[in-house]
C-alpha cells in the first residue's frame, strides 16, 4: 500500500504509524502539498463465551489420529 500524490501519482511509502501518516504531505517529486486521511474498514467477529458442542461430540478429523468438534452456534472448531 502506498500514498499516491494526487497531482503526479508519485508513490510515497507510509511510515506504518497511522498518526504520522495522517495529515499534510508534500510530494517528493513535484512538491505538491496534499492531505492524507487514514481510513479503516473494521471487521467484527464474535464467538460464544461457552461453546455448545452439541450431542454429536468428537468426530474423526482430517489428519491422522485427530478428532475435532464444532460449536452448534458460532461454528468454532476444536481439535484434540
Image (cartoon, rainbow, N blue to C red):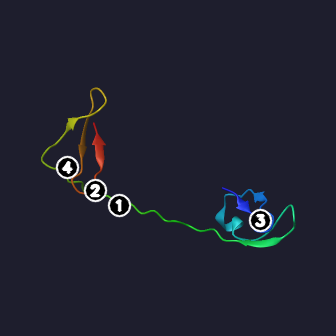
- Residue 34 location in percent, x, y? 77, 72
Quarter containing the C terminus: top left
Residue 5 placement: quadrant? bottom right
Q: CA distance from mark 2 to mark 3?
A: 44 Å
The mark that comes first in sequence, 4 or 2, is: 4
Residue for point 26% across, 34% down: 61
The mark that comes first in sequence, 2 or 3, is: 3
Which residue matches tag 4?
Answer: 53
Q: Secondary structure at mark 2?
A: loop
Q: Tell me whether the residue at label 2 lies in contact with that at label 3, contact meaning CB atoms closer than 8 angstroms.
A: no
Residue for point 52% across, 65% down: 41
Residue 18 placement: quadrant? bottom right
Q: Tell me whether the residue at label 1 lies in contact with that at label 2, contact meaning CB atoms closer than 8 angstroms.
A: yes
Q: Secondary structure at mark 1?
A: loop
Residue for point 82% across, 65% down: 27
Q: Secondary structure at mark 3?
A: loop
Which residue matches tag 1?
Answer: 46
Q: Is residue 28 left or right of residue 37?
A: right
Amino acid at each position: 500500500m502506498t500514498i499516491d500524490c494526487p497531482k503526479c501519482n508519485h508513490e510515497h511509502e507510509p511510515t506504518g504509524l497511522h498518526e504520522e501518516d495522517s495529515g499534510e504531505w508534500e510530494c517528493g517529486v513535484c512538491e505538491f502539498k496534499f492531505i492524507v486521511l487514514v481510513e479503516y474498514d473494521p471487521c467484527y467477529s464474535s464467538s460464544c463465551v461457552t461453546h455448545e458442542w452439541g450431542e454429536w461430540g468428537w468426530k474423526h478429523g482430517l489428519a491422522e489420529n485427530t478428532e475435532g468438534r464444532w460449536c452448534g452456534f458460532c461454528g468454532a472448531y476444536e481439535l484434540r
